[in-house]
Amino acid sequence: MEKELKVGIGDMKLTRGEGRIITYALGSCIGISFFDKAIGLGALLHIMLPERQNIADANVFKYADTGIQETLRKLTAFGMVRSRTIVKIAGGAKMFEIKGNASFGNIGERNAMKVKQILRAEGLRLVAEDTGGNYARTMLLDVKTGDVVIRTFGKPEKHL
Amino acid sequence: MKIKNYEDMNLQELDVMREISSIGTSHAATALSKLLQKEIRISIPEVSILGYNEALSRIGNAEEIVAATLVKMDQDVDGLMLFLFDLNFADTILSALLGQRYESFEEMDQLAYSALEEVGNIIICNYVNAFSKLVDVDISLSVPSSTVNMVGGILTVPIAEFGHETDKLMYFNADFVMDGKKLSDWLLMLPDIKSLNAILEKLGV
């Protein structure tokens, strides 16, 4: 059977050659896939919040800033070259809308903004995204092809 | 503040929270029973303090579709109330209310969704009313907001809301029993840490 790695919330997995990396039900969180085709290296990161506020927090993958940084460090150690790497993101939804409280639940939007800002600053190519909306997404990266599949409730599967 | 994390709570404090939650849940069950004109019993509530991944595995699989109603609490207690229905619960309620059966969430129309939101709101309001009377705090509630979606995505809402404070969720759940059938539901009362301290202090624990 083909290898399938599961990424929890505030977590990251990487693999090389073949296999699939999956993260389930991204709500306001963001899934970020990294893929370097030349060496068949792929990673999927699941972040929950834009920035780490407490530097004592050892859970670096929970936050966009420290999570992307640590993922890039690991991938670079495995031979990733930034100019070859393509990045795709999904998630950042607003699951609940509370009338008269616009700021509630906009964490998804803030996550998406922060992730894009960091990717730009790191000189990474964001080639596709499926963000926003009010529904959860399951994101799956096929490390053989770099294909990203997005599953949602009540809609057909989407390829990024 | 005495408590910095949910998991700092000792057994006595947890017991008190369970007791209050039991009273809240029984008020919610009474309201539901009046609405549906059916006898409803409840099982003994449990208080759980779990990480996201553990909480999720108790409730179901991440991609399972559930209906959820969310209400935000303000004033003396800040936090969220979240009520989750699985398909079985939703179907039982809708068949009692609307006389219609549903085999999936996809089949439900706007009317069914509104009915579920109302039921979620009634359960939450009755729970919070009983809770605030007992603890003697004022809690104001936002209008309810509902969704039908993957349970994993729904649970990230409270996790992200309190993400800088804690990685845990504290939730109470009790099963409703109607016509001899057990209905699983999850009522999550999620006070922030500051409010949790205020509640415990007010109760003299």
Image (cartoon, helix red, strand yellow):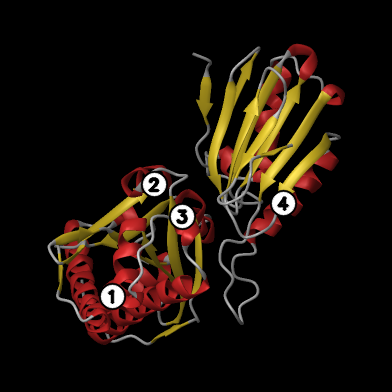
Crowdedness near tag 1: few (<14), some (14–19) or many (≥20) residues, C-alpha within 10 Å:
few
Residue occupied by mark 2: B56
Are dots 2 and 1 on a single chain? Answer: yes
Please state which amino acid type lies under the numbered disc 2: Leu
Crowdedness near tag 2: few (<14), some (14–19) or many (≥20) residues, C-alpha within 10 Å:
some
Are dots 4 and 1 on a single chain? Answer: no
Please state which amino acid type lies under the numbered disc 4: Ala
- For residue B201, the mark is 1
In the visual, does A23 lie left or right of B151? Answer: right
Instruction: Tell which subunit mark 3 falls on.
Output: B
Of A4 and B107, nearer the camera is B107
Residue in the image at 53% along x and 15% along y: A2
Element type at mark 2: helix
Of A159 and A97, nearer the camera is A159
Report x, y in % for residue B203: 23, 77
Query: CA–CA distance between discs 4 and 2?
Result: 24 Å
Q: Earlier in the sequence, mark 1 or mark 3?
A: 3
Using the rendered image of the protein, determine whether residue B187 is visible from the camera's viewpoint: no
Q: Earlier in the sequence, mark 2 or mark 1?
A: 2
Crowdedness near tag 4: few (<14), some (14–19) or many (≥20) residues, C-alpha within 10 Å:
many
Please state which amino acid type lies under the numbered disc 1: Glu
Query: CA–CA distance between discs 2 and 1?
Result: 30 Å
- For residue B155, the mark is 3
Report x, y in % for residue B3: 34, 61
Question: Which quarter of the figure has residue B204?
Answer: bottom left
Element type at mark 3: helix
Residue in the image at 47% along x and 45% along y: B63
Residue occupied by mark 4: A112
